[in-house]
Amino acid sequence: MYKSRTHTVEDRIVSIHQPHVRPIVRGKSQAKVEFGSKIHVSIIDGISFLDELSWDAFNEGSHMEHYVEKYRERFGCYPREVLADQIYCSRPNRVMLKEKGIKLLAKPLGRPSPMSIHVSPGERNPIEGKFGQAKTGYGLNRIKARLRQTSESWIACIFLVLNLVKLAGMALPCLIQNLWFSFSALLLEIIANKSDGRNNSYRNREIADANRIKYELVC
């Protein structure tokens, strides 16, 4: 710093125990600078996908195309709609999504018309709530691992548990529905067997009467 006459050092060590940790300027009122990893998470049908994890600060808006291509790698097609924060809604991203036939659910550029319907801030509650659940319930903001690889595994395991909790909540209604369908099918089968039994008894009685008449005629 003295020789180059600068006041910054790239990749400087801010923690002896965790030399991979970098300061990330967030500009929040409570903490203007945070220390730790920066992650990008996308939610698809309630399931969280950890798209990117980095210990350096990055602009997630410039990585929008990379996240869209990751969706295509997972599911074999592009998403029909994308609901994103304002940082993702730049002009290049809007053009890119339009070329791929993806609808962007966000505030349009320019002065909005009074009759247009915009996306309310509450529609982004699922992703914000997912981060809150990971921090308060599973300690995402209290990663105590020392090594870089261990910390990354810890973070990935937290989102794995979140997905398992989500799937467990979805499995219970499906189980009840399957049990109800099974019970209904069993009840219908019992009713059908009873009706078949009655029809068989009537049919056997008619056959016996016909045989008796034939026997009398022969005699």
Image (tube, rainbow, N blue to C red):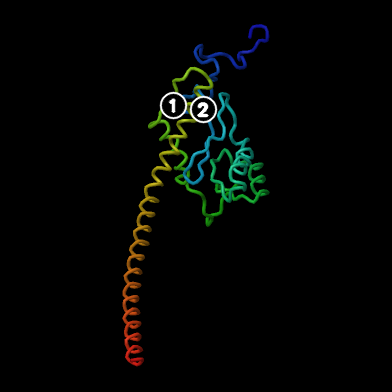
Query: Closer to the camera, 96 or 48?
Result: 48
Q: Is residue 168 above or below residue 184?
A: above
Mark 1 secondary-structure assignment:
loop
* Marked residue nearer the N-terminal end (1 or 2): 2
User: Considering the image in quadrants, where does the N terminus appear?
Assistant: top right
Within 10 Å of disc 2 (Cα), the crowding (few <14, some 14-19, many 20+) is: few
Mark 2 secondary-structure assignment:
loop
* Left or right of 176 on screen, residue 43: right
Q: Position of residue 29 (x, y in %)?
A: 45, 27
Dot label at residue 14: none
Q: Is residue 20 above or below residue 47?
A: above
Q: Which residue is mark 1?
A: 141
Q: Residue at x 35, y 72 (%)?
A: 196
Query: Closer to the camera, 149 or 201?
Result: 201
Residue located farthest toward the front when viewing the structure as drawn = 219
Q: Residue at x 50, y 42 (%)?
A: 43
What residue type is disc 2 on? Arg
| Disc 1 to disc 2, C-alpha distance | 15 Å
Q: Nearer the viewer, mark 1 or mark 2?
A: 1
Dot label at residue 26: 2
Q: Residue at x 64, y 51 (%)?
A: 101
